[in-house]
Amino acid sequence: MKSLLKSFFIFSLLITSFTSDAAEDKRVSHVVVVWLKEPGNLQMREKFIAASRQLETLPGVVSRHVSAVISSDRPKVDDTFDVAVTVTFENKQALKKYMKSKQHKEMLHSKLKPLVNRIVVYNFGGQ
């Protein structure tokens, strides 16, 4: 009986720990999937990636990753895009500030948008 109570107590602590961690996690993920004007053009991909990396040091950014697509034979994997960017922010406010920043807006208009045919953006988190 004592071992059963100990197990239940430990299990309860673990559940409480995981629940409170999830409730306190305010991070927001911003995912941008990009189709270039010239699909598959390696020079355009590299140009986009290099320009995008200049935004890594903006305030509120926890982590940032940009890279070219990985082709796949799996039917459920969408590998029709050229490049994707994932940015993790401290919270929703940091994402909003990033989106309004002068450096972000200038980079989008002068270097990134001229290369892009289509984008899809996903934002999630910040509970």
Image (spheres, rainbow, N blue to C red):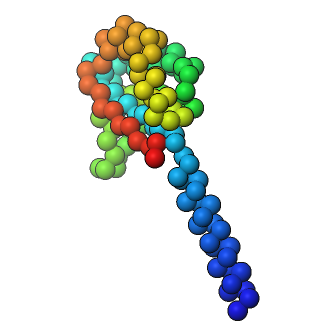
Residue drawn at point x = 34 percent, y = 19 percent: 41
- Residue lying furthest right in this view? 2
* Quarter occupied by residue 106: top left
Please say whether residue 86 is visible from this viewpoint. Answer: no
Residue drawn at point x = 52 percent, y = 42 percent: 26
* Quarter occupied by residue 16: bottom right
Q: Quadrant of the N terminus?
A: bottom right
Is residue 41 shown left or right of residue 10? left
Give the x, y percent position of residue 62: 57, 32
Give the x, y percent position of residue 126: 46, 42
Please say whether residue 13 is visible from this viewpoint. Answer: yes
Give the x, y percent position of residue 118: 26, 25
Nearest to the observer: residue 48 or residue 40: 48
Q: How many marks?
A: 0
Residue drawn at point x = 30 percent, y = 32 percent: 120
Give the x, y percent position of residue 8: 64, 79
Residue drawn at point x = 62 percent, y = 72 percent: 12
Is residue 110 shown left or right of residue 11? left
- Residue lying furthest bottom in this view? 1
* Quarter occupied by residue 84: top left
Nearest to the observer: residue 41 or residue 57: 57
Residue 35 to residue 74: above or below? above
Residue 106 to residue 84: above or below? above
Nearest to the observer: residue 85 or residue 43: 85
